[in-house]
Image (cartoon, grey):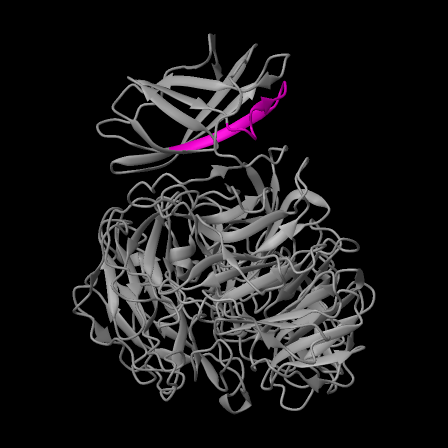
Amino acid sequence: MRRIRTLTVLLALAAGLLAGSPPTALAAEPAPRAAFAADSYTWKNARVDGGGFVPGIVFNRTEKDLAYARTDIGGAYRWQESSHTWTPLLDHVGWDDWGHTGVVGLASDSVDPDRVYAAVGTYTNDWDPTNGAVLRSADRGATWEKTDLPFKLGGNMPGRGMGERLAVDPHDNDVLYLGAPSGHGLWRSTDAGVTWSEVTAFPNPGNYAQDPGDTSGYASDNQGITWVTFDESTGGAGTATKTVYVGVADKENAVYRSTDAGATWERLAGQPTGYLAHKGVLDAENGYLYLAYSDTGGPYDGGKGRLYRYATATGTWTDISPVAEADTYFGFSGLTVDRQHPGTVMATAYSSWWPDTQIFRTTDSGGTWTQAWSYTSYPDRENRYTMDVSSSPWLTWGANPAPPEQTPKLGWMTEALEIDPFDPDRMMYGTGATIYGTENLTNWDSGGKFAIEPMVRGLEETAVNDLVSPPSGAPLLSALGDVGGFRHTSLTEVPSMMYTSPNFTTTTSLDFAEENPDVVVRSGNLDAGPHIAFSTDNGANWFGGTDPSGVSGGGTVAAGADGSRFVWSPQGTGVQYTTGFGTAWQASAGIPAGAIVESDRVDPATFYGFKSGKFYVSTDGGATFTASAATGLPAGDSVRFKALPGGEGDVWLAGGAADGPYGLWHSTDGGATFAKLPGVDAADTVGFGKAAPDATYQTLFTSAEIGGVRGIFRSTDEGATWARVNDDAHQWGWTGAAITGDPRVYGRVYVATNGRGVVYGDTAGGDGGTGPGPGPDPTPTGACEVEYTVTHQWSGGFQADVRLTNTGTSGWNGWSLDWSFPGDQEVTQMWNAEHTRTGATVTAKNLVWNAGVAPGASVAFGFTASWSGTNAEPSSFALGDQVCGRT
């Protein structure tokens, strides 16, 4: 189940209507040169495979095996047919635009399959401070350009499963339509998404809101224009399609049509009322517009629904619902046509939560229907399908339900449903937790069973609240939204099960005993049951604790260093402490309710807390806290702090806000005093990892802004210098929830994202140096090879990556690469190398950490540059006197 996602910080951002801006991975102007080094990291996901709501799947209509998926908070993905995996496309979205990881609409161009578009923005209320945008790509999502919109979009708002709200004209692919929420109407672009204007002739901006009385603006927002569908039989190549259908969130006026390419519009006569049209899918061959209706906007709600067929030539409406209206307790949403056999149509009962979702299929345009499962003798049921979730075994939820429920479920929130337009045997559908699919769908019609399995590998969509990496046992334990969390014994394999006994819907906090890592505690949210749980085997097995009176949510929890006591700050009541495993909690004195709590990692009786600018210390196991005299700390509660393993009283605190103290603080006296680190403009998380070779202090990691640049940073010298370890292609939106290094692997860092799961990085360097200066004088010998790639280009600027390979037989102890641009290009910023320019010659020189390059090894760096006229590549590269080969 996908819950509402909110962030624990507010960002002061501004957005306006921009057209033709540079790729979203880059700033419009070159960023100031940062006072930090950079390190080359490789980034991967700790595999969960799925974990969130997939409201949209889009197949290209003219190119086989080209498909995309959109998620509500975790970006967009492209299908890789060769590996049956998904490739993330929006990891470049940065901190300031974090809302652009929510995708409310996606369109693949059938005229030019290289083009793809995404309508992005997460919330239409003030939870998201930025306006929405339309991203456009000419290389299938490898790179993007962005047009900001003058209104917000709601990728994680009610009604997000309706659609698609974004559509490309199948004949004139410079024409796109976008359905806007919040009363902003229908918008159109005539220049392939570069600029947009409102279609003022469109008469109805919608009026339906899930809960008009909701003062937060979340459920009370007008869901607006919900889908756009073209009738491709009414146009020809290069001319705009004449007939366009548009769905509107209005129960009395749900469908409109234009027959003059959008110049004028009319309400479709004779249409059913009392419902919202979630989907409108056109079969141009037979002249039918199919519509899936629900009485609400979804994706969680819906109590009644209908399926209708509209004959485009005669205007005749036919109710083709597979069950009588009186027998529905759900709405319809998922809707697809078999493009090889257009009379074959499928639909989902998206809101049939119990006992399961339902999928319906007709092969005669809705005359008769069959369904994926049916009762034999209640509560027993017979399925037309088999399910194999061995690749994602946690999808059983560790459940053992009584009939008619089964595990794993066929799904829930099943608003995305698509038959491959080139292969009638392949169908994919999205759920609240994964993408399921089959490759022998037509067995349905022959009386056999079709096989369903997860088709979700590579798509990671969990929101991460907390992370720990113990010194022994599993390398990673996570606290996640919606699916609770996982114990990863291998980062490259899907864990067998999320935490159970109890199974929190969302785990809010996680800790282990530093001196006894087998003892683990977690707190979280659960509709009925305890909000705290304990493990004595490193998180492999769990048992629930006992809640003190008044607890309503998980809050934060801390384990004493030896595992003998715990301090818990739950929602709904004040801070509590206990000895043993939470059978008898007592109220802590001297600390306010809602404080964030952590433990000292050496002294088992010492715990720390923070609330509203004050730091608190307990030396009696949490029974009493005393406010520290430390001043100058962040005034609000957007703070995360941790105590250093092995360092008694050594505490690091990150957090703040733009209108007050913001940064990274360090205490070596148990919080009595804090010193703010210079040069760290803002910091939101802090964590520790294995010390670098020859270093005595553990490696620090933070999600921060240093030298004017936002990123993930590492320090091996107690915060004196920093290296940025991510890059502009790997930003993942908001990363302010948690970070930790690995105490067993130098350089490894685990980063919490808000919708892209747990990403982890490993260094490609090796000696741990973080100083910003160049290394020893380059003395390379032997052959070399250069790969030069322009990765992004826009008006007046571009970004390039350079890979230098040692193809000789001897190692390099430093390197210096020279080249000349053939035009007026000028480097404005370089990372992973120092650069100078003499006349037309550019020199890129190693940093301390990447000076050594073994035979056969490579080193990579990148830069942004300005240009005008033409942007021709350099003709040659030289390493000293050695001219390098080109790849």
- The magenta stretch is 847-863
Q: Quadrant of the N terminus?
A: bottom right
Examine the rendering and report whether any part of residue 409 can be seen: no
Residue visible at 62% across and 80% down in the picture: 570
Is 24 a magenta residue?
no
Q: Nearer the viewer, residue 70 or 692?
A: 692
Q: Compared to 740, does 572 lie above or below? A: below
Q: Position of residue 546 (x, y in %)?
A: 74, 84
Could you say which quadrant of the image residue 496 lies in? bottom right
Could you say which quadrant of the image residue 602 lies in? bottom right
Q: Is residue 802 left or right of residue 257?
A: right
Q: Nearer the viewer, residue 89 or 298?
A: 89
Residue visible at 58% across and 40% down in the picture: 42
Examine the rendering and report whether any part of residue 722 can be seen: yes
Q: Is residue 93 left or right of residue 496?
A: left
Q: Compared to 813, does 706 lie above or below? A: below
Residue visible at 54% across and 28% down in the picture: 848
Q: Is residue 18 left or right of residue 678?
A: left
Q: Compared to 847, does 379 lie above or below? A: below
Q: Position of residue 647 (x, y in %)?
A: 69, 55
Q: Position of residue 768 (x, y in %)?
A: 61, 36
Could you say which quadrant of the image residue 534 lies in? bottom right
